[in-house]
Amino acid sequence: MMQTQPEIATDVVLVGGGHTHALVLRRWGMAPIPGVRLTLITDLVDTPYSGMLPSYVAGRYSFDEAHIDLRPLARFAQCRLVVDRAVGVDPTRQRVQCAHHPAIAYDVLSIDTGSTPATVAVPGAAEYAIAAKPVPALLRQWDILLAEVERHPQRPLTLAVVGGGVGGVELTIGLHERLIKLLADLGQPSSNLTLHLFHRGRELAAERNHWTRRRLETVIRARGIQLHLNDAVEAISRDEATGQRLVRGASGVQVGCDRVFWVTSASAPDWLPDSGLSLTDQGFIALGDTLQTLSHPNVFAAGDVATMVHHPRPKAGVFAVRQGPPLTENLRRYVQGQPLKPFRPQKQFLTLIETGDGRAIASRGPFALETALAHRWKDRIDRKFMARFSDLPLGQMTAQGHSASKTPSFAAAIADTIRWAMPTTRKTLALPSKASPAAGAPPLPQCAGCGSKVGSSALAAALRRVGEDFPKTSSEAVLIGLDAPDDAAVVTVPPGLAMVHTVDYFTALVDDPFVFAQIALKHCLSDLYAMGAQPHTVLALVQVPYATPAKQAEMLYQILAGTTKGLLASGTPLVGGHTTVGPQLALGFACNGVADPQTLLRKTGLRPGDRLILTQPLGTGTLFAAEMQGQAKGRWIENAIAAMLTPNQAAAAIFRAHGVTACTDVTGFGLAGHLIEMTRASGVTATLNLDALPLLTGATDTLAAGLLSSLHPQNLQAGEFIDPRGASHPLYPLLFDPQTAGGLLAAVPAAIAQTCLDDLRRSGYPAAALVGEVSTAAAAQYALSIASPGGT
């Protein structure tokens, strides 16, 4: 049988989850292009909307109302999501360097990472001030400050904001409004708060019209905020006696502050100078009218990180939003070989500036007014914009994207685009081979059987890169491994030890192959740790999606890189495997371990009186079921992924050191299924305290919404062995939730259970919990009972 699914031929990589790229994802999702894979690299799953930031600080919006959740948006756009921070671009090799991932290859790149406040030139600013960007760091510090005020409301509080542009003024007003209300709610006078605003200019918001500038100054002074105009901050230091930050202005004034917020002019990311991309004198990416860089026609940019050289505009969110449609259009045109369209941003635009207490200034050109209506207008505009990313138009998506018959050949198309968009440049884009299928062209049939194997050149390229980028894990036990061209690996077994074999294989539940490989490996190795064995060798079983040989090699590299990283901790060598192509990414491992046959951990080892300890929170099944339906928050999934990446190796060692009597890993059959296997094999019964179960964030929400794994109904059959009197507990369904890369469930003697638990929590398992105990089965009707509230 032959497959005809389109193969991946072109990689479009978006770096940064700013406003422009959020709009690109939404528009791309409505009409994806067959053969073109979209990837988003971002260190923020929840990206803040700058238009709502002042009101969010003031307490008028919730976190979800003021943030774009990029994970469901990426899923809607059929876009791979790589949660990491980009730290560089190599346009020659066409790769993006990341802080914690291997380099990611691209054919077409777009950058929308935003800017950062310029603090470097002022001594002490980088060390003692809280920068307005990145916004999540600012908001974390803001939450800490609010918590401190709630704990000690009677303490005087002095704050300073540096920067009197519109952003600095709005932040100052938002801080003041929220803190004054909080102090009033806590029964404290507003005089407990002193707020300073420093600005190097003679007037606030110098880029706005005269009336707006004067009105903002009036608003600031009317609030009792101490305004320091024409007083540039020259240094910030720390008062060793009080711990306060000392802000020194050019006028000689020095103010002691508990916090200093830095909202000055924007600067470019520090990795851009080494990127080789065209830059302005200020260090921002220099763009032409088509939003392409002047140096590399296959690299685009938008938002605050870039400047259109023919149409420079202020670094403001309104321009980033306006660039969304033309950037999407030109990315689509570029990969399809169509002429790009120039974009000319408007010179004048409406500005709505928050002035607090439900009022705002509406300003455009020389005209401005301040009313409550302007605030309501702004609120309506902002909510409508944010609704685009929560109310996704699933019914309007095209099934196949644009018609393949209308798409020209990729190589010819790109050449035409370069000639049209860059008529004077001599730079050329490295094009795919003419043998490569065009983006959107009818795919070549893919054979089954051995014809579905990944080609030797792609496999060799991936293995070569892994060997160059990662230290080699060697073992004297391996006689023939990956370095030899033989048909099978050959290993020796240490005398007196038994071999322990296990295998697991499943389709990808995350679309980042580097992360998925680590999750799958942790899942597979856990069987060995649960048996008391140590990993000896590993074989990989890999299926990559249909793609050109170059794309297959790149995916294999990411998978093998993740596998290698996961194996480094245990020093276990990868000795071979099998690779094939198919409709989706899938991965498994045949893991081989060694153990003393006299000290194997069996499910038959439970003893009455033992305490049950679970090392990892539950809920991956319901959370990922919810994500597939667009009902899970991105931060819930990121938290779950972090748990799934936590190895079980150290936990197994701690259990052995504390006299573990039985152990299993909690995976596909759920907590109930695996525990019942243990109780029935041991001839005992167990009691679980559901209130003590560690839970992943969001799991109770998705469980309550009835969002369950497709395996849940089969796991529920284990309920016949559970005392039905516990079925009314709201967490009862979680017992049957299948876990991917779950933790260990172990029984330890009661006398040392707490000591064991403390060691686990100190060793990287903060959610570890005592969840139950083992009892005799003499008169028990059920293998598992649920403790009554308050019981053990």
Image (cartoon, rainbow, N blue to C red):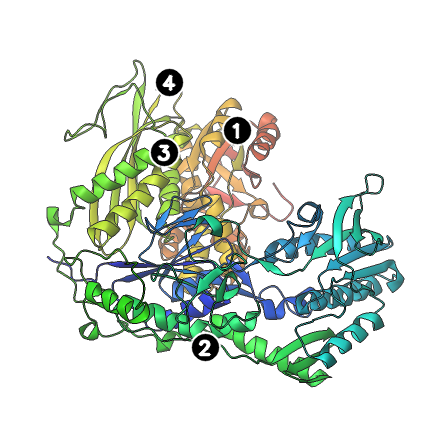
Q: What separation in Å lies between label 1 and label 3 (alpha carbons)?
A: 38 Å
Say if residue 85 shows up in the picture: no
Instruction: Judge by depth and name the residue closer to the eye, 82 or 713.
Output: 82
Q: What separation in Å lies between label 4 and label 2 (alpha carbons)?
A: 76 Å
Residue 598 disc label: 4
User: Where residue 725 appears, x then y in whole percent?
Assistant: 53, 52
Left or right of 33 in this view: 366: right
Q: Are marks 1 and 3 in contact (CB under 8 Å)?
A: no
Label 2 is placed on what type of residue?
Answer: Arg
Q: Are marks 1 and 2 in contact (CB under 8 Å)?
A: no
Residue 470 disc label: 3
491 versus 724 height, above or below:
above
Q: What separation in Å lies between label 3 and label 4 (alpha carbons)?
A: 36 Å
Say which quarter of the image contains residue 459.
Answer: top left
Q: What separation in Å lies between label 3 and label 2 (alpha carbons)?
A: 46 Å
Instruction: Judge by depth and name the residue closer to the eye, 729 or 192.
Output: 192
Provide the residue designation for mark 2.
Answer: 344
First in residue order: circle 3 vs circle 2: 2
Q: Are marks 3 and 2 in contact (CB under 8 Å)?
A: no
At mark 2, the secondary structure is loop
User: Where residue 756 appears, x then y in whole percent?
Assistant: 57, 29
Left or right of 649 in this view: 154: right
Label 4 is placed on what type of residue?
Answer: Gln
Please tell me whether mark 4 or mark 2 is closer to you in this view.
Answer: 2
Please tell me whether mark 1 or mark 2 is closer to you in this view.
Answer: 2
Q: Are marks 3 and 4 in contact (CB under 8 Å)?
A: no
At mark 1, the secondary structure is strand
Q: Residue furthest front?
A: 424
Q: Residue at x 38, y 66 (%)?
A: 77
Provide the residue designation for mark 1.
Answer: 748
